[in-house]
Image (cartoon, rainbow, N blue to C red):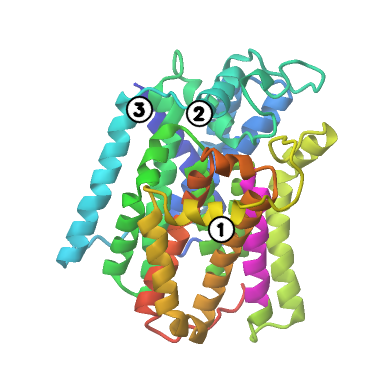
Amino acid sequence: MTILLTAFHIIVDVLIGLGILYFLGNNKPGMLIVTLSLALGFLVEGLFAGILNYLGVSVLISFISFAVVSIGFFSCLFLRSKGQVLPSRPEMRMPTSWIEWISIVVIAEALIWTAFNIYKMPLYFDDALNHWSGRAKAILFDVNWSWVKDSVYFLGDPFGHPEYPLLIPFWRAANACMLSSPNNISDRVDGLLMFLITLITIYYWTLQITKSREAGFVAAAIVSSLPLQTWHATAGYAELHIQAFLLLSMWAVFNNRLVLAGLFTAGMIYSKNEGLIIYMPCVLSYVTLRLLLNRETDFHQKFRGLLKYNVTWIVPTAPWLVFKVWNNVGFTIPSEAGLGYMEGSIQMFFKMLLDAPASNLFWIAVIVILIATLRRIIDHKELRLLVFTGLLMMAMFIFIFTSTGAYVFMENQMTIHRSLLQIAPFFVLICISALLTFRENRQLNPIN
């Protein structure tokens, strides 16, 4: 029954997402459209539930209302568009090479392992128990939860840090509201969904760049085989959520879908604080550079594109951000340490990057590939921009972990490894693209 109700929940999210994409133009492959729709539905439902909960509406009533709106909205569009709101049927082709077959086996093994562990292994990690699922239970049962600043239960404070965003707790609360009580699947299935979104996005984006199915499958297989990917797909944390929204944001900018990019950036911000502090400035830099370097658009088109992106991430997140400012809730976990370089921290950072058993070979390979393909990167506009943005993300991490209170999370290795995990898929895309190079002399696309 849990699986059936979870499937219904996913369908509800996909339907609202399909409706949004229909208005924005859904001219992408069917599987990718479903992936984009699921991510959009995840975001919209979280915002919808958060606003209604603030107004005193229970999670169950909120989810029923959302389901009615989603199904009704999609049904009206389906009738009005004569079925055009549906995604196109994906082109199904059997693998044609041993590289594709091996990649599919690697990906399938990772997904099966993840699904099995979600079903069998209990939830036991600290933040997953406290914030991500603990607050979901507090929201669901309306116990130890309050929106009133003076309450001891303000934003579920007994469970952890009120600074954490609430997209994931609200989605998990909605996922459990149809059950008699939350369980392993309702608490963590969203991690598997975000893992799937990451793999599908990385496959289609790599395929788009390299014009090679083999490259797309290899990229997805590499991502699926990184140890912390499958582990965090079952751990109940938020790493894969922000990773998926980051990848979708960058993909959308690459394809000049700036409204979509803004919405996915909102998903990052509402998933985890890194979305606002680290990744939004990086995506904004990517958007700005692509607009400025596009010679086919005039100043007004560039300004309109920049405005389009910023408005579409600011509007969805404004209620949450204003609420935090109004109630003096911070955007980072409180720390006694201020800004300032911590002695020896830069050496420690690169030790964590290049000497960690779970990822050292991966990051060493990334560095080697970027150096070996430097000439190709310099010669190609798109690659230059992608590499610059990736290095900017890494620079943000270096600053955060060496010059702020987050140093302690590198020193005790509590956060550093899973933070670097978030940008690993993006670097997989960069490295494979650099190795194969763009097969066409692809110029910057005009901004839509």
Which residue, given by chain and number where applicable, does mark 1 sit on?
249
Can you tell which mark lies on residue 4? Answer: 3
* Helix, strand or loop under label 1: helix
Query: With 254 as the anchor, is 1 left or right in this view?
Result: left
> Is residue 17 at least partly visible in the picture?
no
On the image, the x and y values in percent for residue 87 come to 41, 55
Give the camera-side residue of 437 and 287. Answer: 437
* Helix, strand or loop under label 3: helix
Label 1 sits on what residue type? Ser
Front position among marks 2 and 1: 2
Q: Quadrant of the N terminus?
A: top left
On the image, the x and y values in percent for residue 414 come to 52, 37
Residue 278 falls inside the magenta stretch: yes
Which residue, given by chain and number where applicable, does mark 2 sit on?
128
On the image, the x and y values in percent for residue 185 come to 39, 26
Answer with mark 1 or mark 3, whichever residue precedes in sequence: 3
- Cα separation, mark 1 vs mark 3, equals 30 Å
Circle 2 residues within 10 Å: few <14, some 14–19, many ≥20? some
